[in-house]
């Protein structure tokens, strides 16, 4: 995970690689399920063979402990 | 749909709004199924209450008739 700045807001971001679109979309859904469980939602970019996940906390316009926890959980799904 | 330039490549793009994350993700899956049917794949950005879909043709680094067809089919799903 790296931190990028999006319109001045720090965002945790990571790319995950897959064999094709279907596998990428499966991962997107797994991350989506994780997000729904805790009602904290990332931005997920689904492409052929690649998913990019961004975690940050809208309310504080930055990174909260929860974002790092969600990033770790996302990695567990994707690695 | 509008045309935006991504690294010099023209891309058809449109945002679709939803009530929450779950409904956005459902739409992402519908667009994904559409893409798998014809093995032509967009970039789909899934966020809370919003999905952004980009269609273009990698091989020609631009827009092909198929992209406009897929955009129209995507709109049918989202409207």
Image (tube, coloured by chain):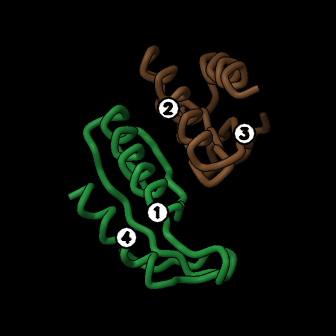
Chain colours: A brown, B green
Q: Quadrant of the N terminus of chain B?
A: bottom left
Q: CA distance from mark 3 to mark 1?
A: 24 Å
Determine the image quadrant of residue B19: top left
Contact, CB < 8 Å: mark 1 with mark 4? Answer: no
* Residue position marked by numbered label 2 in the rendering: A29
Task: Choose the circle earlier in sequence order: 1 or 4.
Answer: 1
The answer for how far apart the CA atoms under marks 4 and 3 are is: 26 Å
Q: Is residue A15 visible?
A: no
Tag 3, which secondary structure? strand
Label 3: how many Cα within 10 Å (few below 14, some 14–19, many 20+): some
Chain containing mark 1: B
The residue wearing badge 1 is: B38
User: Label 4: which residue?
Assistant: B71
- Mark 2 surroundings: few (<14), some (14-19) or many (≥20) residues within 10 A: some
Depth check: give the residue in front, B4 or A29: A29
Q: Kindly identify which chain the residue marked by label 2 belongs to.
A: A
Q: Relative to A47, is B2 above or below?
A: below
User: In the rendering, at what x and y percent does residue A44 appear?
Assistant: 55, 42
**Element under label 1?**
helix
At which x and y percent is residue A12?
69, 35
Task: Measure the C-alpha gap from mark 1 to mark 4.
Answer: 13 Å
Marked residue chain, label 4:
B
């Amino acid at each position: 995970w790296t931190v990028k700045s999006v319109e001045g807001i720090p965002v945790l971001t990571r790319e995950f690689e897959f064999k094709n679109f279907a596998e990428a979309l499966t991962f997107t859904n797994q991350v989506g399920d994780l997000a729904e469980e805790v009602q904290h939602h990332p931005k997920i970019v689904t492409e052929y063979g690649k998913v990019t996940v961004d975690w940050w906390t809208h309310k504080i316009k930055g990174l909260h402990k929860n974002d790092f926890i969600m990033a770790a959980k996302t990695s567990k799904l994707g690695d």
